[in-house]
Image (cartoon, rainbow, N blue to C red):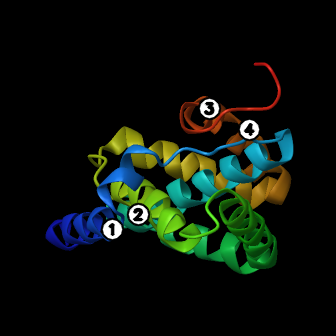
Amino acid sequence: MKSLVRLTAAILVLALPAEALAQVKFKRCLSDTEMAVEQLIRHGVFLREAANRCDEMKPGTAAKWKAFDQRFGPRLKQQTDKRAKLFQREFKQDALKVRTYFDGRLVTYHRNVPLTVAYCEHADDMLDEIGKRGWNGFTAQAKVVQNEVLLDYKSCQPQ
């Protein structure tokens, strides 16, 4: 499986011209709404990957994510669609390629985080919280991702 992840990441990198990789930066700043969308997407990727990977170590995590995804799938899709429009705005010619590169990077990272009991317990606690608090719990958790998002994107609002 790790070989497949590495191969996928390599293909994604090779799919973009070398000059594009060096310049995969957003031209404009992102609004607070756009930053929040990116936070939600990244948090969803983290929880999905952690839930699926931790299921053997902490049984039930995959089922908790699946239940959340079934319950809030339309909202998650809305966020994904908003993010797609953002990439289209910024990368008119190669929006899908660039978005695939960003997504591949996120998934590859989360699939290669070493599994530990603490990591899986933390993910399980977060899944329990969103199971109880629903979308509001998910969005509250996603706000923690802000610093990571600010590393990749420039905010229109001074931080």
- Does residue 112 appear to the left or right of 85 in the view shown? left
| Quarter the C terminus occupies | top right
Q: Mark 3 and mark 4 in contact (Cβ < 8 Å)?
A: no
| Amino acid at pointer 1 | Leu
Foreground: disc 3 or disc 1: 1
Q: Which residue is label 4 attached to?
A: 29
Mark 2 = which residue?
104
Amino acid type, mark 2: Gly
> Nearer the viewer's eye, disc 2 or disc 4?
4
**Mark 3 packing: few (<14 Cα in 10 Å), some, or many (20+)?**
some
Q: Residue at x 75, y 53 (%)?
A: 37
For the residues labelled 2 and 1, say whether their Cβ atoms are less than 8 Å apart. yes
Numbered tag placed on residue 150 in the rendering: 3
Residue appearing at x 71%, y 62% in the figure: 83
How far across and how far down the image is residue 8, in percent?
Answer: 27, 71
Q: CA distance from mark 3 to mark 1?
A: 23 Å
- Residue type of the residue flagged with mark 4: Cys
Q: Which residue is at 30% across, 55% downward?
A: 18
Indicate which label's residue lies in the foreground, 2 or 1.
Answer: 1
Are the residues tagged 4 and 1 within 8 Å (C-beta)?
no
Q: Which mark is residue 12?
A: 1
Q: Quadrant of residue 108?
A: bottom left
Q: State the CA–CA distance, disc 4 to disc 3.
A: 10 Å
Upstream in sequence: badge 4 or badge 3: 4
